[in-house]
Image (cartoon, rainbow, N blue to C red):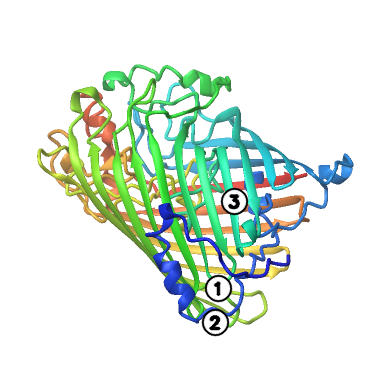
Amino acid sequence: MKLPQRKTRALPLPLASHLILITAAVISQSGLVNAAEPAPTYTRAPIAAYNFAMDDALLGNSYEKPVWNLHETLHLPSWLTVGLENRTRYESISDTFKPSQKYPAVTAGSGDQQIALQTSLWVQAKLGKFRLATEFMDSRALASDAGLNKTPNPPNNTQVDTADFTQAYLSWADQNAFFSGYGVEVKGGRQTMDMGSRRLVARPIYRNTVNNFTGLRVRVLDYERWQFNAFGTMPVLRYPNYITTPPGGNPNLLAPNANLLVNGDQQWDLEDTQTFFSGGLLEGYNVLKNINAEVYLYNLNEGDSTNNATRNRHYFTPGLRFYIKPTKGKFDFVAEGMGQLGTVQYDTNALNNKQQNHQAWSEHIEAGYSFNLPMSPRFVLEYDWASGSKSSKYNAGATDERFDPLFGAADLDFGSSGIYGAFQRSNINSPGARLNFAPRPNLTVALQERAIWLASSGDCWGGSSCSSAVSPGFIGNTQGGSGNYVGDQLGISSRYNYNSSLNFEAGWFHLFKGQFAKSAISTVSSTANANAAGVSTPGGDTDYFYVSSQVRF
């Protein structure tokens, strides 16, 4: 795509973005950038919803066009785009990595499985510089162990969100807005977002449901030097809502909406009008030779609403990232640091709604080399760390240090996040290595190894809401600890592209359980009943397998 010629700017920068664009001004004066930032050159969209095949309003479409497509079949006009796709994935897990959410606990050797279906319809009308677009998605989990929530992975709204509008927005975009040389896009309505590295704000690729928001997003692109994104939104709540801990902690009470998920009943998603999520991100291209830089700040102000009790998170999350894009025959790297300040409620229980100060941080570092060899191998060493609190119990005056990944994608660094999803960016200390290669042009293979410790052995394993497991020494009167070694995860996945409309993928992950994973107990145990206290995870290693297909029209 031919990019617009850079022209002399006649207007000053908007006051609202003046502070964060100082970096861009420095970059523009550095004299280090001489060429326009090239458009992405991806040829095949990820095995995920149609969002990833949508054309970029400022950079054009960088994905291969489906060979079987509705536009040509239906002889649609050039201003109208219609796309339909389906992803079907079979998943199986044995010897769950975490304790049962409710009593009685699952015994060693038990398994779980499901067929995850994700179907998406995308319709967009281009009217000059305006675009009116909507995405209608249906996400279901079939053949899952369902109903009584006595299995490690009952249906929930990370897997099920039946028949709803994932996106519905109006946008205006101009590749050379007001002859300034800048590309500008303004988008208002319900939408999905991928910001920066996607570690804190993302539309998950692997998960069966997606994150979406309702509000306004503004994007300004200097094709030669930088890109700026700003947004102000309300997160969208997925319904039917699934409550993992029943009212009063009574394990004999089913969550009121559990059967809706099991039966596949439809309930419209709603904006969380009591929560506001906003932020800005500035990315500079080739700041120093081929090193790109990114600075961002996100703000989350969360409140309770009907059928949605929250932890009342009030966070400021600043971050900084430097990276070099992978290139054959060259080294590349990523270094990202994230901080978090604010306040948070200890849990959503009305009897234990203690407020705490919150200070947390996280980092991701990776160094890779892409060999200029047959099969295009790329080897990467990586390390992730996210802080945890000294104790998962509430302590008066204590500061909560458990890092919250906000709306990020865990599969980016830790592997698949279907009914497995063992790891999140919270209370984790994990070095690892990856090897990617392509035996054939239409076949790719990825190998991954991860050793996992807890950043704080006194805190929980399983996410910022402490939903999975803790050391036995921190539940009731149970004595003793279980260390901080969770285990070692090995994974392999492979993708075969029959053509641009039909793709297949399969993967296997094995978790060699460490001391903590073998002896940790459910966080629900302390509030459920005496019979549940001290229930631990199965001792066997975890095996997770999946195979999926995607058809895109």
Quarter-of-image position of residue 90: top right
User: From the viewer's perspective, is 60 left or right of 299?
Assistant: right
Quarter-of-image position of residue 120: top right
- Amino acid bearing label 3: Glu
Which residue is label 2 attached to?
A: 330
Which residue is label 3 attached to?
A: 185
Mark closest to the chain's N terminus, 3 or 2:
3
Could you say which disc has been placed on residue 326 in the image? Answer: 1
Assign the N terminus to one quadrant of the image.
Answer: bottom right
SS of the residue at dot 2? Answer: strand
Q: CA distance from mark 1 to mark 2?
A: 7 Å
- Amino acid bearing label 1: Pro
**Number of other residues with Cα within 10 Å of mark 2, as a class: few under 14, some 14 to 19, many 20 or more:** some
Q: Is residue 301 above or below residue 450?
A: above
**Number of other residues with Cα within 10 Å of mark 1, as a class: few under 14, some 14 to 19, many 20 or more:** some
Q: Is residue 354 above or below residue 223?
A: above
Q: Is residue 43 above or below residue 525?
A: below
Q: CA distance from mark 3 to mark 2?
A: 34 Å
Tell me where residue 518 appears, x and y as whole percent.
30, 47
Q: Are marks 1 and 2 in contact (CB under 8 Å)?
A: yes
Residue occupying the point 55% across, 47% down: 206
Q: Compare residues 77 and 429 and report the one nearer the observer.
A: 77
Tell me where residue 276 appears, x and y as whole percent.
39, 37
Q: Is residue 18 above or below residue 101?
A: below
User: From the viewer's perspective, is 526 left or right of 477?
Assistant: right
Residue occupying the point 59% across, 51% down: 185
Residue occupying the point 38% across, 20% down: 306
